Image (tube, grey):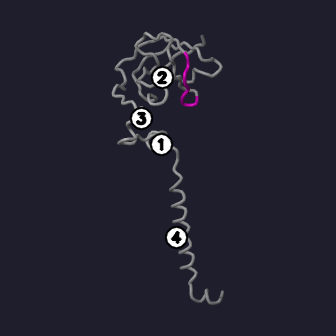
Amino acid sequence: MKLLLSKTLHPIFFYSTMLIYFALSFYFIFRAYRPAYPDYALTNVLKIQSGEENKNSVAIDCGCERKFQKSYPVIWSGKVIATFAGGEDIGVKTYDQNAKYKQFYVDGNGLYNYNMGEDVRIQGNLVGLTCAYSNTVSGECVGEVEAEKITQL
């Protein structure tokens, strides 16, 4: 059998065919394994279906998301309700429930750590409104604050 194969199939043809076979195999295998993009959950996992499935969803349409032309200094106290970006950013529910913004998203700039507990005071600048977590954590558009100082209460 070995003699017959070597006489009928030229080695260059055999190795080029095997190279093409392996190249296509790796192409189709690695095509299925895509890297995790930051917006992967928003574009693929949390797709809002149209039609009857969308009637029962609580998706919030936030047309209010914007950045302010100038920032406003704020000092707010509240309870941490969520952490984002590996603990870098936090979601805070303010103690003053009569305020315009009852919850806010804080760009913590690495100032918050878990040892501070849940009750914190945020000093920073209100830079805009965000709806980034309106469908999961806050349930509404909230103020976006860039923290300058985070202290434990």
Identify which residue is drawn at 39% across, 17% down.
71
Q: Residues within 10 Å of mark 2 (few under 14, many from 20)?
A: many
Q: Is 39 drawn above or below residue 93 in the view shown? A: below
Mark 3 element type: loop
**Residue nearest the observer in this picture, 131 or 59:** 59
- Rendered image: mark on residue 57: 3
Q: Residues within 10 Å of mark 4 (few under 14, many from 20)?
A: few
Alpha carbons under labels 3 and 2: distance apart: 23 Å
Please tell me which of labels 2 and 1 falls first in the chain: 1
Alpha carbons under labels 4 and 1: distance apart: 34 Å
Please tell me which of labels 1 and 3 falls first in the chain: 1
- Rendered image: mark on residue 45: 1
Mark 2 element type: strand
Please tell me which of labels 4 and 2 falls first in the chain: 4
**Stretch in magenta:** 79-86
Q: Position of residue 95 (x, y in %)?
A: 51, 11
Q: Is 53 drawn above or below residue 142 in the view shown? A: below
Q: Is 138 drawn above or below residue 31 in the view shown? A: above
Residue placed under numbered mark 2 in the picture: 105
Which of discs 3 and 2 lies nearer the camera? The answer is 3
Please tell me which of labels 3 and 2 falls first in the chain: 3
Q: Position of residue 34 (x, y in %)?
A: 51, 50
Alpha carbons under labels 1 and 3: distance apart: 14 Å
